Amino acid sequence: MKLGQQLKIKQNQSLIMTPQLQQAIKLLQLSNIELAEFIDNAQLENPFLKEKTGLSEKKLEPAENITPDICNNLNNSTDPLKKDSNVDLENTFDTHLSSDFNRENKNLSEKEIIKSSNTTSAGEVIEKTLENKISLREHLVNQINIDFKDSTIKTIAIRMIDFLHPSGWFITPVDEVAKDLNVDISVIKEALDKLKHLEPSGIFAENLSECLGNQLKDLNLYNSSFKILLDNLDYLPLGKIKQVSKLCNVSEEKIFKMIKVIKTLNPKPADTFSQEKVHIDQPDIIVTRSEKGWRIDLNNSNLPTVNLDENYIEEINNFKLDEKGNNFAAEKIGEARWLKKAVDQRNKTILRVTSEIVKKQVSFFKHGLSHMKPMILKDISDAIGMHESTVSRVTNSKLILTEWGAMPLKHFFSASIASSENTEMHAASAVRETIRSLISSEIASKPLSDDKLAGILSKEGMEVARRTVAKYRDMLNIPSSSQRRRESRLQRLVSN
């Protein structure tokens, strides 16, 4: 066998990921907030991008002006999307977002918005609400400055606020805090003892029993019986009232009265204060009812725009630059024009994907979560002629606002559940919502077991095994039927 080197010519095709193609793919998966940050950074590096502090004012092109390769069927009167589902595909932005967003977003206080005047926006309501509230940190620092005389202990105490759990408990081990603050553990313990006397009552407690005990002490109700009861709180959900009464050496009637007192206490003392970092997720897409059916808009309150400084571009083109300067200017002008085109195409692609989702999930938009249909990425990609990876990137990190609240766009893609009849398949999310609804309407003293739930679902056409019901129930953070029964019994005993 003879070995040697040879030169051969071979022709093949391959996809080359150019930097611009990589960036276009990246833009697809960015949310509106992330896109705004990306454009801000681009403006710092490109002198031909005009800075604009205001929100998006320019409307997207109407569907009839969209190039065929981007969205060739959106405004066609024969398009089944518009014919069958009555989806309004006018790509104009909703200029009344504030009022709509207040009504739909569960995170906002509906009562505050109703009381405000018609000209008050949601942002103003939130700002006024927040600025009038004092944070927990400010509240504690004010007390420390008054109550703590030793400057060293005062400084350490203020730094220890950063170790508080959101509930108001101090659950970080003392030795770890001493190590992080580089002080002796005795100093931490001394500061902690004083911090436990601050308001709100129960703050800086190291566990639930101590938190509730400190509140009872402030009410002058704490005694040996309450101490034993608090040390054995785990027995209460199990319904072991007799055992607890024996441990406390009091009657069962007295135990019920003590439990009523404990129920008036606050196990999370920090909850009454505003959090310093308030984050309200804003949707990227808004779907609302219209006279024609359904209207799909991009959220213009957080959607950035790319604006070119055409005057500066013209000035540079008329200016005589050297070869290096011309090359730099041409490169940056090309990047700016490409970015504007890429962002416009991103927005149109999002609208196109969302419109197909609305078409396939129109039952959800009309009736809610229990009517969600099973759907996978391929269903959308086949319908609009895009690759599954493109659809996946479009739906990544995007929030959509519907009549049923704001939710991730990914939420519409759900596995299918077999049907017990010759009917269409059911989405797993719809089955979970049905389970939630059944449990919420059950008789408290006779909770539905997983077997019974599976039987009811089967009668409704959803073929779900008992173990699947248990899995979905756990996903919904709903306890088992036996635990729900014990909690119901305890609730009845306490309320008597």
Image (spheres, grey):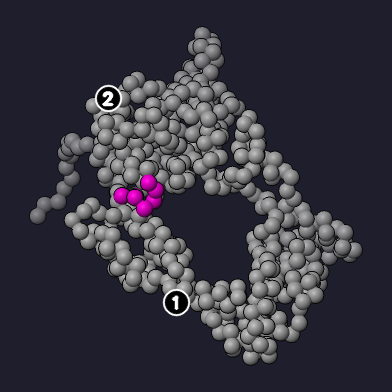
Mark in front: 1 vs 2: 1
Q: Amino acid at mark 1?
A: Ser
Residue at 51% over, 11% down: 314
Is residue 149 among the parts visible in the rendering? Answer: yes
Residue at 68% over, 90% down: 249
Residue 165 bears which disc, if any? Answer: none
Along the viewing direction, whichever of 458 and 428 lies nearer the viewer? 458
Residue 54, image x and y in percent?
59, 26
Find the distance from the CA under tag 1 to the CA under tag 2: 57 Å
Identify whether 13 is placed above or below 447: above
Identify whether 235 is placed above or below 484: below
Residue at 28% over, 41% down: 381
Kindly state the secondary structure of the residue where label 2 is placed: loop
Q: Quadrant of residue 210?
A: bottom right
Q: Residues within 10 Å of mark 2 (few under 14, many from 20)?
A: few
Residue position for label 1 = 482
Q: Amino acid at mark 2?
A: Asn
Q: Quadrant of residue 386?
A: top left
Along the viewing direction, whichever of 150 and 106 lies nearer the viewer? 106
Magenta part of the protein: which range?
367-373
Kindly state the secondary structure of the residue where label 1 is placed: helix
Which quadrant is home to the C terminus?
A: bottom right
Residue position for label 2 = 76
Q: CB under 8 Å between callouts 1 and 2?
A: no
Mark 1 / mark 2, whichever is N-terminal: 2
Q: Is residue 316 magenta?
A: no
Q: Is residue 372 magenta?
A: yes
Residue 411, image x and y in percent?
39, 49
Image-based side of 271 in relation to 413, left or right: right
Residue 321, image x and y in percent?
52, 13
Along the viewing direction, whichever of 13 and 461 lies nearer the viewer? 461
Residue at 26% over, 59% down: 461
